[in-house]
Image (tube, grey):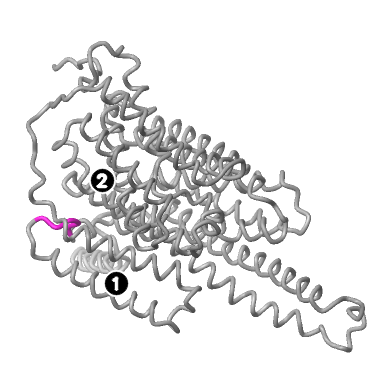
């Protein structure tokens, strides 16, 4: 029997108390999570200040997420190559430079490239810290417990970062958020140089053998898809040459990448990784979930801005409810999924019940004079459900062999962090425009000279009323369709979860009904032959 040694962080100097070391690491993680290229909560202020399109800012924000997702594949190689002190200082310096570029540049390509690298260094610093304290969080290396902590920390930091960004932009300027993060990163560098030492638990591993070209090709593929989703409505989809060229470029790079990965020795993402059922199933389910939760990025903001006339402070104040839902979902997952080991399907059903409740609640309560307190329940359900889904889907990847585990996390990161949100918003935005045109046409049929009730209403005011009514009807219609889709998904999960099935169908020998029937026919023939022999 081997004795379990007490947890320690030898990368820190001896004068730092052992009990304080993990908490110092957590504070450094929070700083990295607050940092990034741009802050999407201040997108309206950045659009006015930098004279850019809103799509430009969104594209840069998604590029940061793409960089974060790609970095998972090479995380262990970076950890074994550099000491913790070196990694943290490199990440701090790189993110400070990225923030300075984002403040002053007005070049969209430079902004996107800068945010892409900011996402890479942000994820590198976060992984370096979290992997250091993993055994402190769960000595048994239980990933369900570890991922509860990860999503609690990450999602809480995202909501708090949005709150701080909006309040900073309201009381001062949006640039001050960047300067605040630069100051925090400077303090982190100082703390790292004082408290850490160059400690290595093993020899340096070189970065040879990493398929950098494959990683670049995956990144370009994702950026092309995001470009199509973000700029689709702006350029009128495939009526424009920009979207057509981006689609052709995306298809060519993707095919070349797949063909190249089929014969090189160590591809950035092996084709074997895609063959595991849990990988492609979570990938597809995340697309469905991002479409169902797309109203949080699009419809809710349109409703609060155009119908309820909320300002930015009232809208961002709802992040406190999102934060509460995130904390509740993480604690619920910890108590049920991590401790009591509830099944994946049971947790998925609970999450889809919350998503369905969120959509149905909005469908039945949406109105012109909706009190702000009424929005608390659906927003809580939405954040509660998303955290559960994120934790169980990420933990389910532990079934993949370790050789492909981090590649599987990158694949899931493609759709959960970057691609999924853009795709869901693009699909829902396109259907919103189509539904708006249809409802404006239907509602305007009665606005003619025969209708005496509109004589005294000015034409401009009448157009505004028509637009607002069409928007309300369209929002309710979309929430209704999404509710039906969510109910169908929930029904499929519940049918799959149900244990009311004939035992002979589940038997490994007779998995199909055809085999069972053949087996029964053979038995009946044998019985008849034995009866004849006896007679």
For this rendering, which residue is in front, 51 or 318?
51
The label on residue 250 is: 1
Name the residue rendered at 17%, 31% in the picture.
83
Residue depicted at x 39% and y 82%: 241
Magenta part, dominant SS: loop
At mark 2, the secondary structure is: helix
Q: Are marks 1 and 2 in contact (CB under 8 Å)?
A: no
Q: Position of residue 259 (x, y in %)?
A: 15, 70
Q: Position of residue 383 (x, y in %)?
A: 53, 45
Mark 1 and mark 2: Cα distance apart in space: 31 Å
Quick one: quadrant of the C terminus? bottom left
Q: Is residue 388 depicted above or below 438 in this figure?
A: above
Is 269 magenta? The answer is yes
* Image location of residue 262, percent across then percent down: 12, 65
| Front in this rendered view, residue 165 or 452 | 165
Above or below 476: residue 310 = above
Check residue 184 in the rendering and tell me which mark sits there, or answer none: none
Q: Which residue is mark 2?
A: 399
The span shown in magenta is 266-270
Callout 1: SS: helix
Image quadrant where residue 365 sits: bottom right
Q: Is residue 360 visible?
A: yes
Left or right: residue 420 compared with residue 122: right
Whether residue 504 is visible here, answered yes or no, is no
In the displayed structure, 129 sits above or below 252; it is: above
Whether residue 167 sits left or right of residue 37 in the image: it is right
**Direction from residue 66 to residue 6 in the image, left or right:** left
Q: Residue at x 29, y 66 (%)?
A: 221
């Amino acid at each position: 029997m081997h004795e379990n040694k007490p947890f320690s962080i030898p990368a820190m100097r001896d004068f730092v108390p052992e009990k304080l070391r993990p908490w110092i690491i957590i504070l450094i993680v929070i700083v990295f999570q607050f940092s990034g290229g741009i802050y999407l909560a201040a997108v309206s202020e950045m659009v006015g200040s930098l004279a850019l399109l809103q799509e430009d800012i969104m594209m840069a924000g998604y590029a940061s997420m793409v960089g974060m997702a790609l970095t998972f594949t090479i995380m262990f190689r970076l950890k074994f190559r550099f000491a913790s002190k070196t990694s943290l200082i490199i990440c701090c310096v790189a993110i400070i430079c990225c923030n300075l570029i984002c403040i002053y540049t007005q070049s969209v390509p430079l902004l996107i490239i800068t945010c892409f690298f900011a996402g890479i260094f942000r994820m590198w610093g976060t992984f370096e810290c979290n992997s250091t304290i993993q055994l402190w969080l769960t000595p048994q290396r239980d990933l369900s417990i570890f991922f509860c902590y990860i999503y609690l920390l990450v999602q809480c930091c995202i909501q708090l970062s949005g709150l701080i960004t909006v309040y900073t932009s309201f009381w001062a300027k949006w640039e001050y958020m960047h300067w605040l993060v630069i100051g925090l990163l400077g303090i982190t560098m100082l703390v790292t140089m004082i408290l850490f030492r160059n400690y290595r638990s093993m020899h340096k591993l070189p970065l040879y053998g990493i398929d950098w070209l494959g990683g670049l090709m995956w990144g370009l593929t994702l950026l092309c898809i995001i470009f199509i989703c973000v700029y689709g409505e702006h350029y009128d989809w495939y009526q424009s040459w920009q979207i057509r060229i981006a689609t052709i470029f995306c298809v060519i790079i993707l095919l070349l990448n797949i063909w190249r990965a089929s014969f090189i020795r160590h591809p950035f993402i092996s084709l074997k990784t895609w063959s595991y059922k849990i990988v492609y199933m979570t990938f597809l389910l995340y697309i469905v979930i991002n479409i169902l939760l797309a109203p949080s990025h699009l419809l809710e903001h349109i409703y609060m801005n155009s119908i309820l006339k909320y300002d930015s402070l009232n809208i961002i104040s709802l992040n406190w409810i999102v934060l509460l839902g995130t904390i509740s979902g993480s604690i619920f997952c910890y108590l049920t999924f991590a401790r009591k080991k509830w099944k994946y399907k049971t947790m998925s059903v609970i999450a889809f019940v919350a998503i369905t409740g969120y959509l149905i609640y909005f469908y039945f309560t949406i109105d012109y004079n909706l009190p702000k307190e009424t929005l608390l329940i659906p927003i809580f359900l939405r954040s509660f459900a998303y955290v559960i889904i994120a934790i169980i889907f990420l933990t389910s990847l532990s079934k993949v062999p370790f050789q492909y585990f981090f590649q599987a996390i990158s694949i899931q990161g493609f759709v959960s962090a970057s691609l999924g949100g853009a795709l869901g918003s693009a699909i829902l935005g396109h259907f919103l425009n189509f539904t708006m045109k249809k409802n404006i046409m239907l509602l305007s049929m009665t606005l003619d000279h025969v209708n005496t009730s509109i004589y005294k209403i000015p034409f401009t005011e009448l157009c505004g009323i028509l637009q607002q009514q069409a928007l309300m009807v369209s929002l309710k219609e979309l929430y209704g369709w999404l509710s039906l889709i969510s109910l169908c998904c929930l029904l499929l999960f519940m049918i799959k979860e149900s244990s009311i099935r004939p035992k002979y169908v589940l038997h490994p020998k007779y998995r199909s009904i055809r085999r069972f029937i053949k087996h029964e026919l053979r038995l009946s023939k044998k019985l008849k032959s034995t009866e004849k022999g006896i007679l």
